[in-house]
Amino acid sequence: MLRTTLAGLRLHKSRYVTTVLAIMLGVMFTTGTMVFADTLEAGYEKTVMGSATSVDAIAVPAEGGEEEPAPLTEEALTEIRALPQVAGADGLAEGQVVLLDSEGRASGFVPPAAVSFGEHTRFSAEEGDLPAGGDEIALAVSTAEQLGFGVGDTVTVLDPDQEKREFTLTGLVEFGADPRYSYSGVVVFDHATLGGMTAAEGYVEIDAVAAEGYTDRQVADAVAGVLGADAEVLTGEEFGVALAEESGADTAMLRVVLLLFSFIAMFVAGIVIYNTFAILIAQRQRELALLRCVGAKRSQVFRSMLAESLIVGLVASALGVLAGIGIGMAGATFGGPLLGMDGAALTVTPLAVATGMVLGTVVTVFSALVPATRATRVAPLAALRTSATAAGLEKGTGWVRVVLGLLAFAASAALVAVSQLAGPNQLGPVIVTGSALIAFLGVVVLGPLLVRGIVNVVGLPLRRVGVPSMLAVDNSVRNPRRAATAMIALTVGATLITGYSVVSASTETTLTKMLDEQFPVDYQIMAQMGTEAVPAAEDAPAEGTGEEAAPAEAAPAEGAPAEGTAEEQPGTDPAATAADSEVEGLALPLDPGIPAEVRDALGEQDELERVIADRNVYVELGGDQSMPVTTYINGRIGVDLTADTVEGDLTDLGPGRVVVSEGYADGARVGDTFTVPGLWGADDLELDIVAITENGGGLTGATVDPEDFAAAYPEVREDRTLYVVADADAEADRVRDAVLSSVEDHPTLQVMSVAEMKEQFTGILDIAFYTVAAMLGLAIIIAVFGIANTMALSVLERTRESALLRALGLTKAQLRRMLSVEAVLLCLIGAGIGIVFGVLFGWAAADSVLPNMVFAVPSGQIAVFIAVSVLAGLVAAVLPARRAAGTSITGALASE
């Protein structure tokens, strides 16, 4: 039987080409994902371990619960240097500075870390030299690349008095994947300069090198003995391992995401493999029956079929593993730099190779089980009849299938309803995914019925186009089970791409609507987080309040905090604020204030129509809950700043009145009295509710009139955010120049164009969509291979029929057209069902996580996908149609 199996493979090898390609593509993606992730992970470990193991012991301040850990002292460093186990030790001091970019603006929303370290450190200059004087500076490699600086350039940094100081960039330092520095960036000074540029005290890390004759463990223990409970001391290797594990978390997540796409590809490949073996075995029933008649047992035939699938799976998987290694290498080469890992050496683990081989082979053998089992159940004499050639694929759709299919659709609909009734939550997408899988099961069960019904409807106009189209429609419904099995793979891919496009479009539309509500302006100005803005002019009034405020430089009232430090204000709980902001869907700023002179300068610009300022504070409501209280100066609530309302009218806001978001209203209605707590000795406000806004939109918490805000929070005298509305007739360039000239003397202020924010946001979503679409496109390609294989095998099965049609007058062009229409019809059915499912489940998934979701159907993308489906059908039919048209009429008619 083994010789018979091998002979059968050689005889039918051309029929397995697309099957091998489908397996190879799925395995390629899986192996490539693992090689790519392993290469990145090894690169992270090499970078981190290489820097950490350059010293023998590393001490960092011990975590002190919720409080910031105290830095290590100079006295402790002196004691460590005196240890006999230590050959040398130095401390890493850290602060923050404002680094200006080439346009003279502060870089980033968060100031970069400013550090200094001595000779014994785990960091070194990758290019150039470390700073050695008061006019020299070094930057992290990533910071320099982001801002476009190179060694030898002049870099400007603000000192504590916000005066500009220029430094010469002498070197670039690789800080690797250290999470403390990977986000904000790093500026390196010598120790003396750092003390003058920041308020840094003590050390955030002490690095020690072992004396001759001592191990790194002995050094770490000795350092721990000096520092005691004030520090956590690790060997360089232990520190590197911990840092690599922390940094590798992103790689692990990336691996999981990519393997999910690999699973989808292998699932679709499994459908193609099953369909291929089902058709092949059905077509070879006479051959298998003949083997049974000459003495082969049923078990031998079964093992022969499995052996055939095993050989195909092994060959295809081996090719897929080789291709996957190449894909992984390409991904590491081109994707590594984007993920902060450049020049990583290719890492191919035995696990990656074994996973690809086992996965591809197992999926192939498993997919062949049902067709092989079915082949052994046909009686040999019955299978010898020509009419039994494809008996296994020509059964109708019984009532049992109908009932099971309808039950699957009903269960899917019930899960979708559950996801909507539960409201936005993290389990929503999981529930929707489960409902989609059940719906796919329903399509598989009811596939033949769906194909027959859709073809009968779509085929009505096609029957009138011409004889080839009429014949194509008849061929499509002749074997609906085969057609349904072929198109289900495309349905899966179409559902995923359409669903994700609906989620992406709905997310973009929803968040754009929120941006329009919250930022109906042209520019937004905020202070850089973590920095102190220039003090306001002395005796500056609290604008828009109608009252004179205390001098800006005057000491705050007893018990009140200094301005611009919202974290220290009574009633301000950053953790609670973050939690509340997440619930409400809006993050209110806790950054420094904006000097009043900036608003004055903006107000004098002819190109600007209106400058709106907001001031806000957080107050405790009891327990762990805090509420944002906001006022908008020069802003018309309900006109300039809007939100969706549950009841009431936003334009009624004025002195003695308040707008409250539903989550904070606690059951109160319009007309009720709402208490807004005062701070720093001020009386609480008893205000009448004029409107209640929906959760998750604009105007979160309590929005009050500027007069009431000044009475309840007299110490808040600086604007948090400025919203600039340009004159309708002003040119965009002149508006930008007017805004930038107004903040010229305040480089720490962040100027953001709302149009640019929206464009950047849209760009991010588009990149994400096209990335996901490209990955899911692999499933579509595999599905098209499956349809091409189905068409090729179908043409082979209908060789005599095609020859007879040619003998009756059908031209070669008409035969090719018939097969092309048949393939396109098959693709359109699969894509059509997938599009319907994608829109439905995309809506359900988006609505299950997005509050106040605005449903959007990307009709342009769907139209493109339909066009691609038509093109895919034409491509799938090219080779089968060409083969059918080139077959000799007389030879085909005389073949049996």
Image (cartoon, rainbow, N blue to C red):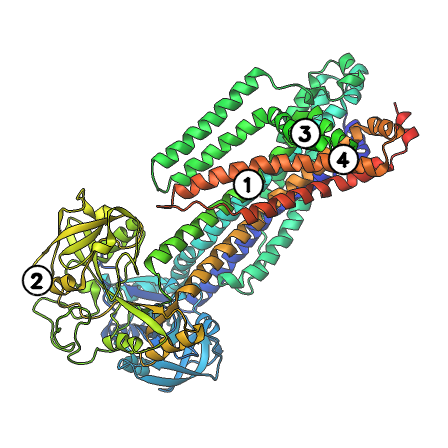
Q: Nearer the viewer, mark 1 or mark 2?
A: 2
The tag earlier along the polypeptide, 4 or 2, is 2
The local secondary structure at tag 3 comes to helix
The CA span between labels 4 and 1 is 32 Å
Amino acid type, label 3:
Leu
Residue 832 image offset from top left, x and y in percent: 59, 37
Amino acid type, label 2:
Ala
The tag earlier along the polypeptide, 3 or 1, is 1
The local secondary structure at tag 2 comes to loop
90 vs 244, left or right, is left
The tag earlier along the polypeptide, 1 or 2, is 1
> What residue did someone put label 4 on?
819
The local secondary structure at tag 1 comes to helix
The label on residue 460 is: 3
Residue 814 image offset from top left, x and y in percent: 81, 36
Residue 138 image offset from top left, x and y in percent: 42, 78
The CA span between labels 4 and 2 is 83 Å
Question: As displayed, is residue 617 above or below residue 273?
Answer: below
